């Protein structure tokens, strides 16, 4: 068992993170009970990077224990590290966990 293991997060409310500024993305998450992860992606670079954007979001959600969520993304050319950070932030907000964040557990997989 890992020394630092994140508690499983539960999407309780709709939440948003990020901006519509260049090199960022805005991500919205909501409940999707029993229906898995559904991602709606809008991006001017979707043809080139859509698969990678979805992969980063899906992996980050899996690392946070999220198995059911509706995710809407408006991408403005965000790098993978930004996508990951925005996904972590939106899950924390939607779960109501915005204080006492377990940074060491996050760092155990967020490298």
Image: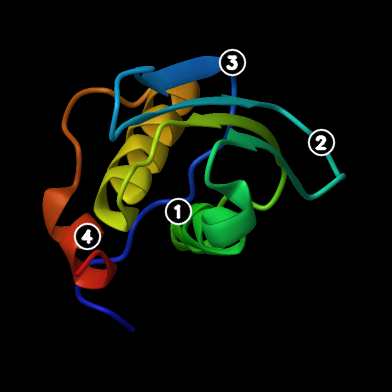
In the rendered view, tell whether residue 53 sits above or below residue 25: below
Q: Position of residue 38 (x, y in %)?
A: 76, 43
Which label belongs to residue 14? 3
Q: Secondary structure at mark 2?
A: loop
The answer to which of marks 1 and 2 sits earlier in the sequence is 2
Q: Position of residue 104 (x, y in %)?
A: 12, 58
Marks 3 & 4, CB-CB < 8 Å contact: no
- Residue located beneath label 2 in the image: 33
Question: Label 2 vs label 3: CA separation?
Answer: 13 Å
- Residue located beneath label 4 in the image: 105
The answer to which of marks 3 and 4 sits earlier in the sequence is 3
Give the residue displayed 22% in from the left and 60% down from the top.
105
Question: Label 3 vs label 1: CA separation?
Answer: 16 Å
Front position in the image: 13 or 26:
26
Q: Position of residue 59 (x, y in %)?
A: 50, 64
Label 2 Cα neighbours within 10 Å, binned few <14 / some 14-19 / many ≥20: few
Residue 58 visible here: no
> Mark 2 or mark 3: which is in front?
3
State the image quarter where residue 25 is shown: top left
Marks 1 & 2, CB-CB < 8 Å contact: no
Q: Secondary structure at mark 4?
A: helix
Q: From the viewer's perspective, is 53 left or right of 7?
A: right
Q: From the viewer's perspective, is 35 left or right of 70?
A: right
Give the residue displayed 40% in from the left and 51% down from the top.
7
Label 4 Cα neighbours within 10 Å, binned few <14 / some 14-19 / many ≥20: some
State the image quarter where residue 12 is shown: top right
Q: Secondary structure at mark 1?
A: loop
């Amino acid at each position: 068992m890992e020394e630092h293991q994140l508690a499983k997060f539960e999407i309780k409310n709709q939440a948003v993170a990020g901006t519509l500024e260049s090199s960022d993305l805005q991500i919205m998450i909501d409940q999707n009970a029993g229906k898995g992860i559904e991602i709606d992606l809008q991006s001017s670079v979707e043809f080139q990077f859509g698969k990678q954007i979805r992969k980063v979001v899906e992996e980050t959600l899996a690392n946070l224990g999220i198995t059911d969520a509706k995710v809407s993304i408006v991408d403005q050319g965000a790098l993978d590290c930004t996508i990951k950070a925005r996904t972590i932030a939106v899950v924390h907000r939607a779960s109501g966990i915005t204080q006492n964040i377990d940074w060491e557990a996050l760092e155990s997989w967020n490298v």
